[in-house]
Amino acid sequence: MPAEQGWTTDYFQGTLRDLTWLSLHPPGSKDGQRFDLIVWPESPSPFFLNDATFREVLASLARQSKTWLLVGAIGVDTASASPQQHSEVFNSAGLINPSGELAARYDKTHLVPFGEYVPFKRFLPFMDMLTDQIGNFGWGYSREPLDAGGQKLGVFICYESIFPNEVREYVQRGAGVIINLTNDGWYGDSGAWKQHLQMTQMRAIENGRWMLIGTNTGVTASVDPYGRIVAATGRQIRTALVAPYGLLSGTTFYTRHGDWFAYLCAIISMGAVLARFLISKPKPQL
């Protein structure tokens, strides 16, 4: 679904019907086949987690499929529940249990500047007048894995996948699988969608975890801990993917120590360059 698609009531309802149908009847599945997890992408429509119609559809799907459901949606905190003392909206992922209840919510912690918020907004009040595409999302504060009946899900949204030091926090805290919900519709036909996919593959390798990618317009895929794509859809296809994944518990060197080895290599390289110019060569003997 293209990013420029207008969000109307008909579009909202049609998208919800399509997602529900594909979740219950994914191509290639067998009648009565059970799944461990159903994943919807980031922002395929303006779904609000506190919207009664949306929640009832999710609850019905979860009960009918007897499956945990992870969905991209807009989370809302009312003024009474918000530390900011006013209502806030978040770019979120909601986890629905098989009984149809909202079990947990992840709020995006690393927002896109000038896309999801305006940095230094009080100094740039004119930005809201330039475009209606700038969001006003609140910041999430937790990178704790979501518990789906014993499955520890490390969930992050869209371009959060390009920050390796942040993704490894989920695995440090016990995530057995990592999941990226994204909307690649913003990239159009550029090569950015492919770069994004390759970055998520690197996060799988770095942390030795299966990576599930649920995307709008891009490549929905399952990536093994070696970075190999074991199942994937094509781009810009209205479909669903039945994909394998596993839950792992070990940690890699990178998960434990992060980028210090790369920093050490950079320091050694800089030292070698400086030494080349600072240490004078011995003068030839006559």
Image: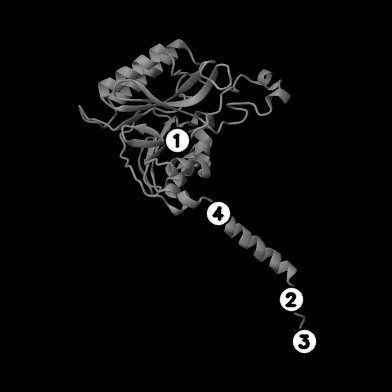
- Going from N to C along the chain, the mark reached first, 2 or 4, is 4
Please give the name of the residue rendered at 43% of the width and 41% of the height, measured from the top-left corner.
173
User: Based on the displayed image, in which of its 4 quarters is residue 286 positioned?
Assistant: bottom right
Please give the name of the residue rendered at 69% of the width and 28% of the height, measured from the top-left corner.
120
Q: Is residue 69 left or right of residue 265?
A: left
Within-10-Å neighbours for mark 3: few <14, some 14–19, many 20+: few
| Residue 149: image location, x then y, percent | 31, 32
Q: Secondary structure at mark 3?
A: loop
Q: Is residue 250 above or below residue 173?
A: below
Q: Is residue 190 left or right of residue 284?
A: left
Mark 1 or 2: in front is 1
- Tell me how far mark 3 sits from mark 1, CA to CA: 67 Å
Q: Is residue 101 left or right of residue 116?
A: left
- Going from N to C along the chain, the mark reached first, 1 or 2, is 1
- Residue receiving disc 2: 281
Report the quarter where the N terminus lies: top left
- Residue type, mark 1 in image: Glu
Within-10-Å neighbours for mark 2: few <14, some 14–19, many 20+: few
Within-10-Å neighbours for mark 1: few <14, some 14–19, many 20+: some
Q: State the residue in front, 276 or 257.
A: 257
- Going from N to C along the chain, the mark reached first, 3 or 1, is 1
Residue 144 is marked as 1
- Residue receiving disc 4: 260
| Residue 191: image location, x then y, percent | 52, 39
- Residue receiving disc 3: 285
